[in-house]
Image (tube, rainbow, N blue to C red):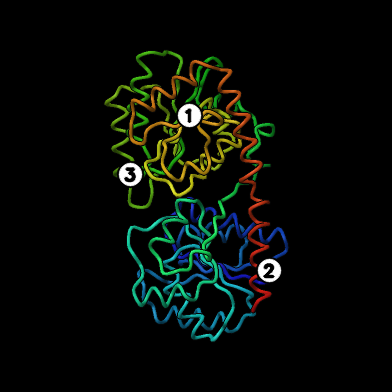
Amino acid sequence: MKILYSCLSKSWGGLEMFTLTSIQQLLKRNIKVELICSADSRIHIEANNFGIILHPVKASGYFHPLTTIRLALLIKQNNYSLVHTQASKDLWQIVPALELANRKIPLFLTKQVGSFIIKKDFLHRHLYQRVKKIFAISTAIKKNVQDTTPVKPESVIVISNGIDINRFNPEKVDASKVRNEFNIGEKEIVIGMLARFTPGKGHEEFLLACKELNREYSNLRFLIVGEASRGESEYAYKIKQLAGEFGLNNVIFTGYRSDTPEVFSAMDIFAFPSHSEAFGIALVEAMAMKKPSVCSNAEGVLDIAVDGVTSYLFENKNAEDLKTKLKLLIDSAETRIRFGENARKRVVEKFDIDLITGRVMKIYEQETENI
């Protein structure tokens, strides 16, 4: 089997990272995979570092006749078994290219984010009728796709993102590494969040909760892990200013970290205050590291966290409720341990990347057999 992936996004976040993870998993199974990406994008650089066969193109917006022709030639000259795109916007390049190349191979689409636009006009009907299956990463995204796009309901399947449970394994990680780096004492309780700096991730609510918790506890440290999204440097600066205004001297902004298992290992409690989340891969990673969590009750979280079992859910955008639920975990080491054990068990059973890849491969094989 030979697969052509596409991810023309110029950003760097969960969508782009999981694209690379998916490709690496297929390569481990001796599947040949190549990637179409935007030239000089972050995914271009990262994929090149991994030695993935790349086809960088220039594509911003929707219509790029020269890029479409180039992709058509690529598809025509190679015996690809299927094409799998990671973003619906890529369909504007991929579908015309498949038509120009006169290739009837299956086209798959993964939907990582929802849409607020109804896409049932003639052009979108033309694009989506070429898509064989759509993989929605959560129940919320599946419903959104069925509501907003011209597809048959049965063509949309929930296939969650997965993680490497061997990499995110607390038994294999030195929990003291990051704590020592930031001079965090053994008796201090670390509450952390990991997210890109972009509006809607809940940084403001987290800082408000931190401010209130500091009034009641003297043994807390807070980790805020992540970097600014593309074009969001001003927002990141605003959040850091807010921490200063609140007098939060015990907040540590770590910036981007590649050693995420070690970072999670340094935490006692994970906070996930996102306002709206398609899936929430950082939450899955934290749970795999046996971290109890406090999460917003946003739709995409509900496929992952189980209230009162792995996590406490709080009312979305409600900093006071976030603080209240964090207090429940701060005050009970027993609950932290129990939630952490339950969290890892749930990830192993539902979000192991090997299990997810196996499901995807089975669908690939079924659809390519039917050509």
Spatial CA distance of label 3 from label 1 is 23 Å
Q: Which residue is mark 2?
A: 365
Q: Amino acid at mark 1?
A: Tyr
Question: What secondary structure is found at the residue carrying circle 3?
Answer: loop
Q: Amino acid at mark 2?
A: Glu
Q: Judge the density around disc 2: few (<14), some (14-19), many (≥20) Cα neighbours within 10 Å.
A: few
Label 1 secondary element: strand
- Residue at the (32%, 28%) spot, across then down: 243
Relative vertical location of residue 260 with respect to residue 70 in this rendering, above or below: above
Q: Quadrant of the C terminus?
A: bottom right
**Of callouts 3 and 2, which one flags the residue occurring earlier in the amino acid sequence?**
3
Q: Which mark is residue 312?
A: 1
Q: Nearer the viewer, mark 3 or mark 2?
A: 2
| The quadrant where residue 23 appears | bottom right
Q: Specify the quadrant of the image occupied by residue 173.
A: top right
Assign a secondary structure to mark 2.
helix
Residue at x 55%, y 59% (from the top left corner): 157
Q: Amino acid at mark 3?
A: Pro
Quadrant holding the N terminus: bottom right
